[in-house]
Image: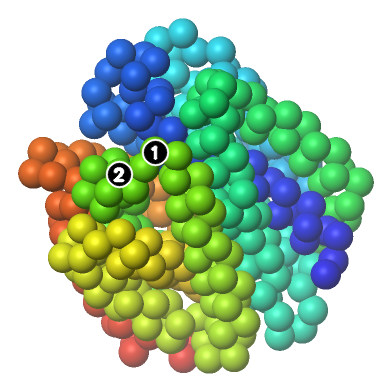
């Protein structure tokens, strides 16, 4: 495995801990700041909105070297998470979470392009999945570690850990990632030209709706597993490891399968599976082992669609690859924000209802993926 791809994965590892650890530590943050769990869910949405605000800024940096952009984004990750660890109240943490989200989508957009340029012939999807693997490893080890640290010490230590990891990531990107050929400058308007076609909108819509469905449920996975499934608070670290294992397995399998069967086909099948699993979670979450197994399947599906989505959006965005690569992360996190919000409303009926309200979102994501696969996949092979 190329060291340059590992360095890129270091960045997604830090971003993954920053984004997903909030789901596991939500009760600790809510208790410490004196807010309700649904209100604490705003910290999830603030990060997601930061992603949406930060990604378009890549247009301003389109003439800069890709490696230089990556280093600047990692520096911003350091600042945002350091501020989060020092936040003294609701509004300060909300602002810090927004700043922490600013580099997220932009990093994925640039890193996807760099990974594609560094990939061996015919292995672009696999290279992108290796880059994304950092985020899945974050969920396998980083998020459980953050949950454990929040339980034994303080949730602030988790964000301090991410800030420290950003320093390490900066060093290894500087050392291991080569200077790759930049993208042709198509001008300011040229960056948006690909959005005139329907194919990118189908991918972005499938991403936002599909991931929104998952985050309706996953944003409140901790209270669901403890209040509905009957797991103890001490078992949450092990359960987060299981969820992370699903993400790692789903992402790596998807990368290889996408190179073999096309990203559109893999994304369509997986998105359909997610809808079924969410429905099963609503009916079977009261059974501890069913809930744990379905959780792993759903998190596997969440990242099994990530690599196809990231690869496809770059293919359908000629001349606007930077914006396209960032836009799919905007869609992902827009779905994250909407899902956390809608799931919070559903919590009033019980902690298993967020999974049910996520089903229509997942079904609509499946339908958009299916339309893309049937009508446009062949044009972008």
Compared to residue 371, the image places residue 302 above or below, namely above
Identified at 30% across, 67% down, the residue is 290
Identified at 36% across, 42% down, the residue is 232
Compared to residue 294, the image places residue 338 above or below, namely above
Q: Quadrant of residue 377?
A: bottom left
In-front residue for pair 355/255: 355
- Image location of residue 240, percent across then percent down: 48, 50
Residue 225 in view here:
yes
Q: Earlier in the sequence, mark 1 or mark 2?
A: 2
Identified at 56% across, 85% down, the residue is 257
Secondary structure of the residue carrying tag 2 is helix
Q: Are marks 1 and 2 in contact (CB under 8 Å)?
A: yes
Q: Which residue is mark 2?
A: 226
In-front residue for pair 156/340: 156
The residue sitting at the left extreme is 349
Circle on res. 219: none
- Image location of residue 211, percent across then percent down: 35, 58
- Image location of residue 166, percent across then percent down: 72, 34
Q: Which residue is mark 1?
A: 233
Between marks 1 and 2, how big is the CA–CA gap? 7 Å
| Left or right side of 287 for 252 | right
Residue 219 in view here:
no
Tell me which colouring the rendered structure shows: rainbow
Badge 1 local density, few (<14 within 10 Å), some, or many (20+)?
A: few
In-front residue for pair 234/85: 234
| Left or right side of 146 for 3 | right
Q: Quadrant of the C terminus?
A: bottom right
The residue sitting at the top extreme is 88
Secondary structure of the residue carrying tag 1 is helix
């Amino acid at each position: 495995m190329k060291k340059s791809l590992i360095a890129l994965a270091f960045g997604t590892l830090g971003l993954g801990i920053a984004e997903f650890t909030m789901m596991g530590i939500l009760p600790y943050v809510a208790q410490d700041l004196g807010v309700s769990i649904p209100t604490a869910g705003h910290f999830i949405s603030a990060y997601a909105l930061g992603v949406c605000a930060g990604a378009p800024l890549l247009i301003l940096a389109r003439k800069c070297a890709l490696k230089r952009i990556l280093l600047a984004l990692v520096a911003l990750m350091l600042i945002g998470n350091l501020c989060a660890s020092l936040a003294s109240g609701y509004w300060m943490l909300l602002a810090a979470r927004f700043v922490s989200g600013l580099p997220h989508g932009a990093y994925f957009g640039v890193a996807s392009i760099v990974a594609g340029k560094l990939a061996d012939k015919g292995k672009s999807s696999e290279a992108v999945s290796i880059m994304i693997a950092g985020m899945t490893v974050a969920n396998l080890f980083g998020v459980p570690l953050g949950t454990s640290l929040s339980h034994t010490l303080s949730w602030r230590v988790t964000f301090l850990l991410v800030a420290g990891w950003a320093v390490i990531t900066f060093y290894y990107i500087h050392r291991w990632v080569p200077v790759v050929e930049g993208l042709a400058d198509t001008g300011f308007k040229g960056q948006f030209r690909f959005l005139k076609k329907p194919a990118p909108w189908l991918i972005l819509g499938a991403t936002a709706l599909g991931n929104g469905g998952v985050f309706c449920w996953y944003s409140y996975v901790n209270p669901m597993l403890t209040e509905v499934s009957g797991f103890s608070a001490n078992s949450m670290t092990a359960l987060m490891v299981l969820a992370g294992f699903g993400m790692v397995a789903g992402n790596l399998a998807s990368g290889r399968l996408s190179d073999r069967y096309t990203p559109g086909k893999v994304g369509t099948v997986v998105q359909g599976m997610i809808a079924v699993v969410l429905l099963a979670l609503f009916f079977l979450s009261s059974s501890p082992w069913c809930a744990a197994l379905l959780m792993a399947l759903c998190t596997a599906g969440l990242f099994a669609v990530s690599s196809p989505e990231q690869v496809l959006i770059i293919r359908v965005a000629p001349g606007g690859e930077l914006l396209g690569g960032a836009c799919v992360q905007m869609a992902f996190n827009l779905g994250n924000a909407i899902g956390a919000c809608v799931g919070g409303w559903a919590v009033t009926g019980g902690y298993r209802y967020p999974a049910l309200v996520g089903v229509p979102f997942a079904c609509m994501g499946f339908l958009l993926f299916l339309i893309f696969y049937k009508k446009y996949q062949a044009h972008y092979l």
